[in-house]
Amino acid sequence: IFSSTAATFGEPQYTPIDEHHPQQPINPYGRTKLMVEQALADYERAYGFKSVCLRYFNPIGAHPSGSIGELPRGIPNNLAPYLTQAAAGLREALTVFGDDYPTPDGTAVRDYLHVMDLAEAHVAALRFLDKATDRQAFEVFNLGTGRAVSVKELLQAFERVNGIAVPHRIGARRQGDVTELWADPTQAEQRLGWKAKHSLDDMLRDAWNWQLRLAEE
Ligand code: UDP
């Protein structure tokens, strides 16, 4: 099972993104992930080696117990850890990267999914591989909720769910960011028997719970 990424698609040509969407990554992260996808496809053709590539969209949140979560080294690059650190007062303010995108509220749109759902997808993929026929020896699945959420929407949901204000300011767009990217998870549902169960509120509650637990350490 290979942890691939929505970044292998690059600039979306249509949304939601299904497995057949062209892959033209625009950064080294996406390019290297695509190289591994291609190597696995070759490996299957050459040696019958079975694999599943899971293309993660935007996993966030933490284990509901607060005992497992993410702690990026230094200044976080990703939205969720930056946001929880700003809410905790560890960062001065969250910068919203651009509010002039052609989206309903001007901020960029992504497909956030709970890490627990993502973990379950791996179990589903293992089961799939166990039963895979030779024709199914190399498979790719897009993993998301299929729900498009803007940066502002996520920020407001975080404040509402956790009852805490997050200091933030509007900044410039970040280079390399696409306007909108969200998944069509139909294949994962139909073929892996997997579907995201957690809501955005669950993700943001668990992310904050994890940040609070970190502060206790
Ligand atoms: N973002 C933001 N401020 C931050 C970090 C991210 O506004 O400090 C935005 C970013 O522009 C993107 C979304 O949040 O629209 C998700 O970014 P992230 O880096 O978490 O994931 P990506 O989609 O880039 O893989």
Image (cartoon, rainbow, N blue to C red):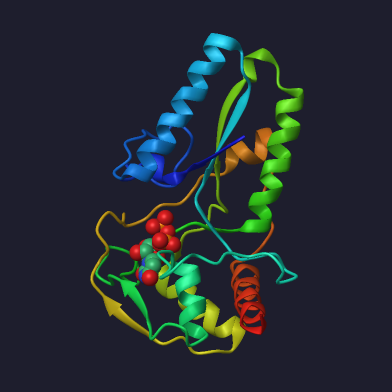
Relative to 54, residue 92 above or below: below
Between residue 104 and residue 183, name the one nearer to us: 183
Quadrant of res 69: bottom right
Relative to 146, residue 21 above or below: above
Q: Position of residue 187 (x, y in %)?
A: 59, 36
Count the marks. 0
The quadrant of the picture occupied by the N terminus is top right
Q: Position of residue 78 (x, y in %)?
A: 43, 64
Relative to 203, residue 161 above or below: below
Q: Is residue 162 left or right of residue 76?
A: right
Between residue 11 and residue 16, name the one nearer to us: 11
Q: Position of residue 211 (x, y in %)?
A: 60, 77
Residue 14 shows in the view: no
Q: Residue, x 47% and y 29% (percent of image)?
A: 37
Q: Residue, x 55% and y 50% (percent of image)?
A: 144
Between residue 36 and residue 179, name the one nearer to us: 36
Residue 191 shows in the view: yes
Q: Is residue 73 left or right of residue 177?
A: right
